[in-house]
Image (cartoon, rainbow, N blue to C red):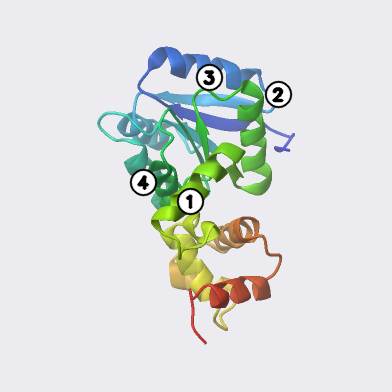
Amino acid sequence: MAKKNRKVSVAIADDHSLLRKALANLVNTFDVYSVVIEADNGKDLRTKILKEGIPDIVMLDVNMPEMDGFETTQWLYKNYPQVKILALSMLSDERTIIKMFRLGAKGYLLKNTDPEELKQALDSLMDKNVYVSEYVSGKLISGLHHDADQPLKELLLNEREREFLRWACTELSYREIAEKMFISARTADDYRQVLFNKLKVHSRVGLVMYAIKHGIVEI
């Protein structure tokens, strides 16, 4: 469950104003969440974040004018990797879903999802740093037909997470890995926890064994 001592701040980026406002009203009914930014597109979101501050969660549409969900996710993950990105879109093809995860999204929901699942997704992002619904899991499995040799779990890793996984297979400490990747020690801890959750392992040894088994690193 999200932290109880303060509201979890949420930003919503969607060019359909009626839907965006309806989403904002819905999220604001959830006890621990508060919508602090509403944006028409990625460019507008970027401007408002720079002006008003960094939210805990960003909900965004994939198909937006000026700066779409792909570009926005890439910018957010590069500049604010601690922000939890939840894609909320009408696009349901596996290529779009996989690309969003690779760019840094932590979850993906269709816009026709039930309010209960949206609340579940937000809670999961705060508790586990990732949310993958049964529907999205099915789409990802379907996408494996296009790349049968690549494990499903690896498809969910973006480039920075793969980089962290490779460094984790060295003798460097997590603090030294953070220095190599030019990130803070806390962000390194976030990467570690994300990999634990995504790869279903519980230790650095588990990370190394996974990387070796799937050819991400060689011994």
The one nearer the camera, 110 or 103, is 110
Looking at the rendered structure, the kind of residue marked 3 is: Ala
> CA separation, marks 2 and 1?
25 Å
**Disc 3 vs disc 1: Cβ atoms closer than 8 Å?**
no
Q: Sequence-wise, which precedes: disc 3 or disc 1?
A: 3
Q: Which residue is mark 4?
A: 75
Compared with residue 97, is residue 28 higher up or lower down, i.e. above or below?
above
Q: Sequence-wise, which precedes: disc 4 or disc 1?
A: 4
Looking at the rendered structure, the kind of residue marked 2 is: Asp
Q: Which residue is mark 1?
A: 81
Q: Which residue is mark 3?
A: 24
Locate residue 56: give its quadrant: top right
> CA separation, marks 3 and 1?
23 Å
Compared with residue 175, is residue 17 higher up or lower down, i.e. above or below?
above
How many residues crowd mark 1 within 10 Å: few (<14), some (14–19), many (20+)?
some
The location of residue 184, given as percent across then percent down, is 52, 62
Q: Which residue is mark 2?
A: 31
Residue that extends furthest to the bottom in the rendered view of this protein: 219
The location of residue 82, given as percent across then percent down, is 53, 49
The location of residue 28, given as percent across then percent down, is 61, 19
Looking at the rendered structure, the kind of residue marked 1 is: Pro
> CA separation, marks 2 and 3?
13 Å
